[in-house]
Structure formats: C-alpha cells, structure tokens
Image (cartoon, grey):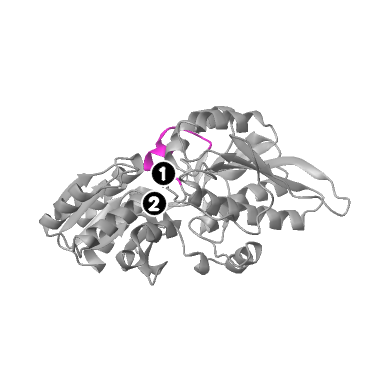
Amino acid sequence: MRRGYLRGFAVIAGAATLILSACGGEEKTTTGGGGKKCDLALGFFGALTGDAANLGINIKNGAKLKIDQYNQAHPDCKVTLKLFDSEGSPDKAPALATQAINDQSVIGIIGPAFSGESNATGDAFNEAGLTTISASATNPTLTQQGWKTFHRVLGNDASQGPAAGKYIKDTLKATKVFVIDDASDYGKGLADEVTKVAGNAAGKDTVQQKQTDFSATVAKVKSSGADAVFYGGYYQEAGLLVKQLREAAVKATFVAGDGVKDQGFITAAGAKAAEGAIVTCPCNPPEKVSGTFFEDYKKANNGAEPATYGAEAYDAATIFLAGIDAGKTSRSDMLDFVNSYDAPGITKQLKFDSTGEIEKANVVVWSYIVKSGKIVADQEIKQ
C-alpha cells in the first residue's frame, strides 16, 4: 500500500502519551523498580496525522504492543518507541528521514508505511545504514533499487495483483471486468497486475486521488456491461466511487486492493452500497494469527480490535527486539542480524531474501468481504 485517506479518527484509547512535533515525536515507557533505561530506540515512520492516519495508527499500535511487552520482560533495558509522523507525504518524508538518521539512539525503523515515502527515503536510509522493515509498503520496485537496508514483512503487489485477478476469474467467475486506478504508483501498478490475470477487460479508466465526482467513470462502467469492477487505489475515493456506482444502478461486484481495507471505505460508501464488496490484502486476518496477539491487542487498547497491518507491525518489531536482545547495538550489526533472521512470527515465517522481500514461500494473500457494515475475512487465495 502506498498511502490511505482519512475522514476523521478517534483518539486511540489505551495508547501511551503521544508527544508529537511537526515532524516527529516519542513514546516513552516509564522505568520502574530502579531499572536502568537503555540508550536504544526503534522508530515508527508513517502517517499519524492527516489524510493517511488510519493505516499509520494501526501499524504504530501493533509495534507498540510488542515493544511494551518486551519492556515488561526486560525492566533493566527498556526500548523507546520514537515516532516520525510523515502524514503519508513523500514530500515531507526526506527531512523526517534525516531527523531519524541523526538520532543515533534509533537502531531500526518500523516503516516507512507507504511506498511513496519509502521510495523518497530509501537512498538516505541506505547510505546511513539504518535498517527499515515495512509492514505495509507493497510497490514491487522498492526492492529493486539496490538498497541493502529496506525490508518488508508482507508480499508485494506482484503477489497481490495476480491473487486478486485469480479471485475475480475463478471465484466470482466474472467475464467482463472494468479496471480503474487512481494514477498512483500503487493503484496503477496493482490494477495492471490484476488485468494480466483477470482478462476480458470491459474497459479501463483512471481517476485522481481526492476526486469526489466519479460520474464520467460511472457512465463508462454502466455502458460497458461489466459484471465486476476492480479499483486500484485507496478507501476514501473507493467509498465514494462505489456509492455512485450503486446510485446509478450498477450491480457489478466491486473488488479492490489493500488500500481499501479500512472501515473508512464503508463510512464513505455507506453500509448498503459497500455490502458485498471484496478487498484483497497480503495480510493475515488478525484474529487468525498465532499466539495471543489478538486478545493482547484488545486488552492494551480498551477492547478495540487490531486493524490492517497491526499484526505485521508486531512482527517487524519482534525482529528488531530480537536483535537488541542478542546484543546488536550498532546499526551495522542490526542490519546483519535482520538480513540473516529466520524465525516464526505471528503472521508467517520471517525470513528475507537477498533483496529484502519476505521469502515467496511465506507470502499470503487473503480476500475480505464487507458484511453488515464490517470488513471480515473471506478466504486465503492460494496461488
């Protein structure tokens, strides 16, 4: 996923005090029992405010849960979570990366959250030798830049796109698919991958991020006679698009990628219009991951359930904390540790190939469906 949009979000209950400046902030854990505090920190890099905050907050909360658990088990050497709020903007990301790089206590970055900001900061993080593990950036080209420091704990869009196309073709048995993208690297790339597999395109169109009137596109879809519509983009526009499709009596099944896997999609569309929509994601349903993550998260967040990429962020934090526990206190040692890491996480076996991708055998893609106003797990799409 490259970025998301937000109409508004509630303050996340149960989180520690958030101290944010215009570019970054810090979440501190109080030491207790006379224990000393280590001089090490992990950074979260992604949107915590602005249009893309939903996804960033999900990821931050997943990482924070693991760090809090680590600190409870290691009272003599607690790790700080430092927050670098990018607002999901590739334009703001480079300066923020410099801030993270110059903070020598930061030994690893959980993020960047979006592909755009990952692309904008990859050179800087690589030059500084600061390891990054993204829980959500899916553009395939990010691991083709020669960076030694970039990693991700999920499959990229070269996995998700074909899986979505396979679902449309084999499960929905759609014969005419209209494909729409939002002109972003993420949205267009994902839509192109879907087209290769789904075939029988009834038509194609491109919209823009922050667009609100989709009447021209709706007219094209209606006249095409499509029985399925695939949208490559993010949940705010997707919600408005499907709302307008349904108002125009277009009954084609609406399918989208992980950029739409957010409750904000249903809010924008309305529950009736969103009902039955399909969303694919290279992420596991959080209630199905191993261990006690699901219940632990709820306890830490006043009953709120983990959302998209919270479990993947927990895994990213797990890798870094294992390195700290093994005595890897320099950036170069941490990079070597991450590159050679091979252990089970809660979402999958965590092992990277030479480019920083999670090994293909461990990639999963799920479909989700909107039922009664909620996005719920449908099935794992086998490839």
103 versus 365 height, above or below? above
Q: Residue at x 15, y 52 (%)?
A: 219
- Name the residue nearer the viewer: 7 or 57: 7
Of residues 246 and 260, the one drawn nearer to the viewer in this rendering: 246
Label 2, secondary structure: give it. helix
Residue that protrudes farthest toward the bottom in the picture = 372
Q: Residue at x 39, y 54 (%)?
A: 258
Residue neighbourhood size for the residue with mark 1, other residues' Cα within 10 Å, grouped as few (<14), some (14–19), many (≥20)? many
Q: Does 225 lie within the magenta span? A: no
Residue kind at label 1, given as amino acid type = Arg
> Which residue in the structure is indicated by mark 2?
259
**Of the residues shown, which amino acid type is indicated by label 2?**
Gly
Drawn side of residue 288 relative to residue 37, left or right:
left
Q: Position of residue 265 (x, y in %)?
A: 38, 57
> What is the quadrant of the C terminus in the image?
bottom left
Q: Which residue is mark 1?
A: 2
